[in-house]
Image: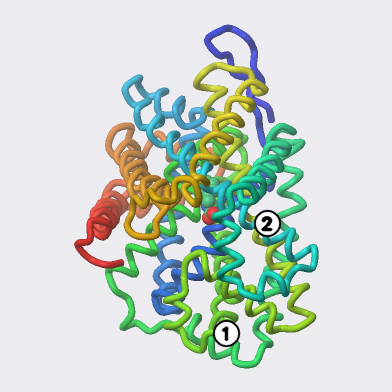
């Protein structure tokens, strides 16, 4: 179905749309599954006691996470507009919430492309058979690369170029097609690499640490980390799911779609952890050692060592693994970039072509700026010793702005427009069996939880406690 929309300048612009239910689910899943699942989730799981983190995370995703996904997709479909327009449709002053939420992907996309560049470099490195070169002294290899004044920029631009080609091909021709190829491959690769890793001697002890919950390890800190991870991983609170909902026809069930998207995202995180945590466990010997080697080093320094120790097979497994990470990073970056294009198109009333150009220039400049944080501007350590511009942007977007946007969205839907407006929209395509619970979640539970994360994150950052 294609909806038409008449912008103020009177020209008929055809609004993009999904070609069907599965295209939407796949695109939302492709947006959700990214570096958050493959790089961030395994390290958090290791850090917070494996199974305990998993348990809390799963419960949160299937209560709070899917409820918010439902709010956003329903809001988008109800109004037929992306974030800013969707809020503005209820009154001019509410546009502010949309503008605030929409500014978040403008921050995230820039640094996402920097990490995307690292992944691109490693993928090409492994595919070109450089596994022993990378693993010889992996820490030096990684640091030399990310601080290099030329090479690190080039790989980031390569990553950006791939993203732009897909976005320029459009929603159906580019995004849907690339998802259709990359997402199934991603699943096959994730399962294959996980199975192979688990056959390594000692890996099963790592798997036990990862899977078995130790209830004594469930702390407020763990809870807060799981909540933050959930926002980022499900691509919530930044207008993306509103935009995706706006491309959706009225027949597709929103309720079952959001459950599928949540399951997909959790499934990939689970598999990624099942590969990375046991592998690192084998290399480092204990869950604690894995936890303390978390962060960028886990994927770019520890894993290359593990692959190298696998011998000849490791070169192949390493290549497959980084192809998998690259696909996940690409589909998320494509989703982020498409959102930016859609915001510029709707907001500045520019044609899609011009909007793509504007977004491209913006990302090029900002990506270059953030990447300079690792070399030219590395003297600037905004978040403490060793931190970079990337850490600063990540903190502002992820820990401060996203909770605020989610809070504003819940208050807006729960208390201002009232959930009934969206309930009618949801019920157009499927029954809403958990209507009461959903309303309580949006009006009370979610806002309180969000305030907790927000205060905790900021307090942790100010050094009130260590997370
Ligand atoms: N959810 C993606 C991930 O886990 C990141 C992302 C955030 C993508 C916001 C799109 C929008 O990596």
Label 2 sits on residue: 121
Q: Residue at x 74, y 38 (%)?
A: 174
Percent position (x, y) of residue 131? 73, 71
Mark 2 lies on a secondary structure that is helix
Label 1 sits on residue: 283
On the image, which quarter does residue 272 sit in? bottom right
First in sequence, mark 2 or 1: give its number.
2
Dot label at residue 446: none
Q: Residue at x 45, y 50 (%)?
A: 390
> Can residue 302 be spotted in the picture?
yes
In this rendered view, identify the residue nearer to me: 425 or 197.
Answer: 197
Structural distance between the alpha carbons of marks 2 and 1: 23 Å
Tell me: is circle 1 under 8 Å from ligand 1. no
Mark 1 lies on a secondary structure that is helix
Percent position (x, y) of residue 345? 57, 23
Q: Residue at x 56, y 35 (%)?
A: 363
Quadrant the N terminus occupies: top right
Left/right placement of residue 400 relative to residue 148 reads left
> Can residue 255 be spotted in the picture?
no
Percent position (x, y) of residue 333? 60, 45
On the image, which quarter does residue 230 sit in? bottom left
- Does 450 appear above or below 13? below
In this rendered view, identify the residue nearer to me: 308 or 256.
Answer: 308
- Crowd rating for badge 2 (residues with CA inside 10 Å; few <14, some 14–19, many 20+): many
Question: How many labels, in total?
Answer: 2
């Amino acid at each position: 179905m294609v909806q038409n929309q008449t912008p103020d300048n009177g020209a008929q612009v055809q609004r993009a749309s999904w070609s069907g239910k599965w295209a939407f689910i796949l695109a939302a899943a492709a947006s959700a599954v990214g570096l958050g699942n493959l790089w961030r989730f395994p390290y958090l799981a290791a850090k917070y006691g494996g199974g305990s983190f998993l348990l809390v995370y799963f419960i949160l995703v299937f209560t709070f996470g899917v409820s918010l996904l439902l709010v956003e997709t329903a809001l988008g479909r109800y109004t037929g507009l992306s974030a800013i327009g969707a809020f503005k449709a209820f009154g001019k002053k509410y546009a502010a919430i949309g503008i605030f939420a929409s500014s978040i992907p403008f921050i995230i996309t820039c640094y996402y492309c920097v990490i995307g560049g690292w992944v691109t470099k490693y993928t090409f490195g492994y595919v070109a058979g450089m596994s022993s070169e990378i693993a010889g002294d992996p820490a030096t290899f990684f640091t030399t690369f990310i601080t290099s004044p030329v090479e690190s920029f080039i790989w980031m631009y390569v990553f950006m170029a791939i993203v732009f080609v897909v976005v320029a091909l459009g929603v159906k021709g580019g995004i849907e097609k690339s998802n259709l190829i990359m997402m199934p491959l991603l699943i096959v690769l994730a399962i294959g690499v996980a199975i192979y890793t688990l056959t390594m001697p000692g890996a099963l002890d790592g798997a036990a640490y990862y899977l078995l919950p130790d209830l004594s390890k469930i702390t407020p800190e763990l809870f807060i980390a799981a909540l933050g991870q959930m926002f980022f991983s499900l691509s919530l609170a930044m207008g993306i799911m509103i935009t995706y909902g706006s491309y959706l026809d009225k027949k597709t069930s929103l309720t079952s779609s959001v459950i599928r998207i949540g399951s997909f995202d959790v499934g990939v995180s689970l598999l990624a952890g099942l590969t990375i945590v046991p592998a690192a466990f084998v290399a480092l010997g204990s869950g604690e050692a894995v936890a303390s080697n978390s962060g960028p080093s886990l994927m770019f320094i520890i894993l290359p060592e593990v692959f190298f120790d696998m011998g000849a097979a490791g070169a192949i497994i390493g290549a497959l693994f980084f192809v998998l990470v690259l696909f996940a990073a690409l589909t998320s970056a494509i989703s982020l970039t498409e959102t930016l294009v859609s915001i510029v198109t709707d907001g500045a009333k520019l044609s899609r072509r011009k909007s793509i150009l504007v977004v491209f220039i913006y990302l090029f400049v900002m990506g270059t700026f953030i990447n300079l944080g690792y070399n030219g501007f590395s003297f600037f350590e905004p978040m403490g010793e060793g931190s970079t511009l990337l850490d600063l942007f990540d903190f502002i977007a992820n820990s401060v702005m996203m909770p605020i946007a989610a809070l504003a969205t819940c208050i807006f839907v729960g208390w201002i427009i009232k959930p009934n407006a969206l309930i009618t929209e949801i019920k157009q395509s499927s029954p809403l069996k958990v209507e009461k619970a959903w309303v309580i979640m949006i009006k009370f539970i979610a806002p309180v939880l969000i305030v907790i994360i927000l205060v905790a994150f900021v307090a942790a950052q100010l050094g009130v406690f260590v997370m």
